[in-house]
Amino acid sequence: MSLGLAFYVTSAIVGMGLGNRDERNRFILADPHRLIRQWAASYNYLFLNKFSEYYTFDTEFDAFISRFRKLPAPIKSKYALTLHAAAWLIAPYVKPTDFHIYLHPSIGKKHFPGLVRILGISPVEKSGNVKLVVPYDKGIFYSSRVVNGVGIVSPIQIYVDLFNHPGRGEEAAQKLLEKINKQWSNGNVRHQ
């Protein structure tokens, strides 16, 4: 991020009353919860990203998730789960029926066939239970992490993706936000 963009963003946050500057002109985020809710309310996961539909015959969540642990090192850092599947790994509430997988643009043609083969997925025209997602911005991967051997985006990104998602997305987002709030209450606010 450029200094100019950082200045613009922090100035906008201050202007919205969500942050301020201290006596040394350091930026202080005053209301992170309201900022996240406003971000989530204005973000549209389905509109902003590009999707490819795939299908897995795995009917059990754990069976499909176990396939991610078998990915070779060059691929492991180039994907991250989101939505219900990712939320299930850190704050189980709504059992996932499909899988949304962000793919880093650098995965390229070299590693993509291996990903498809190891995950055991096949392309379909529509209504797949696996969505390969090309994110509108590589920032999606900021603070992504590995949970139980599986890559997921940050909890904040999962929340934002879930918030406007059809079905029980908003409900799952709320449960995830409760977990994030507990972590923040305990002083763990870095890299959420």
Image (spheres, rainbow, N blue to C red):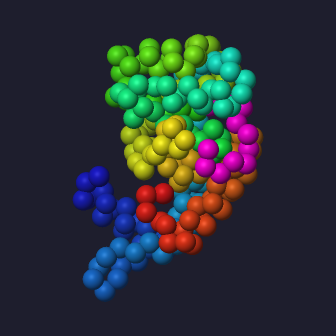
Q: Nearer the viewer, residue 97 or 33?
A: 97
Q: Position of residue 57 (x, y in %)?
A: 68, 17
Q: Position of residue 52 (x, y in %)?
A: 54, 22
Q: Residue furthest bottom?
A: 23
Magenta segment: 89-99
Q: Position of residue 128 (x, y in %)?
A: 65, 21
Q: Residue at x 38, y 29 (%)?
A: 73
**119 vs 149: above or below:** above
Q: Indicate the quadrant where residue 56 lies.
A: top right
Question: Viewed as shown, does residue 168 lie left or right of 185?
Answer: right
Question: Viewed as shown, does residue 48 lie left or right of 172?
Answer: left
Q: Residue furthest left?
A: 3
**183 vs 24: above or below:** above
Q: Is residue 91 magenta?
A: yes
Q: Nearer the viewer, residue 192 or 42?
A: 192
Q: Is residue 94 magenta?
A: yes
Question: Viewed as shown, does residue 57 lie left or right of 33?
Answer: right
For the stretch drawn in magenta, the main secondary structure is loop
Q: Residue at x 36, y 68 (%)?
A: 11
Question: Viewed as shown, does residue 97 lie left or right of 189?
Answer: right
Q: Residue at x 35, y 83 (%)?
A: 22
Q: Residue at x 49, y 25 (%)?
A: 70
Q: Position of residue 152 (x, y in %)?
A: 51, 41
**16 vs 58: above or below:** below
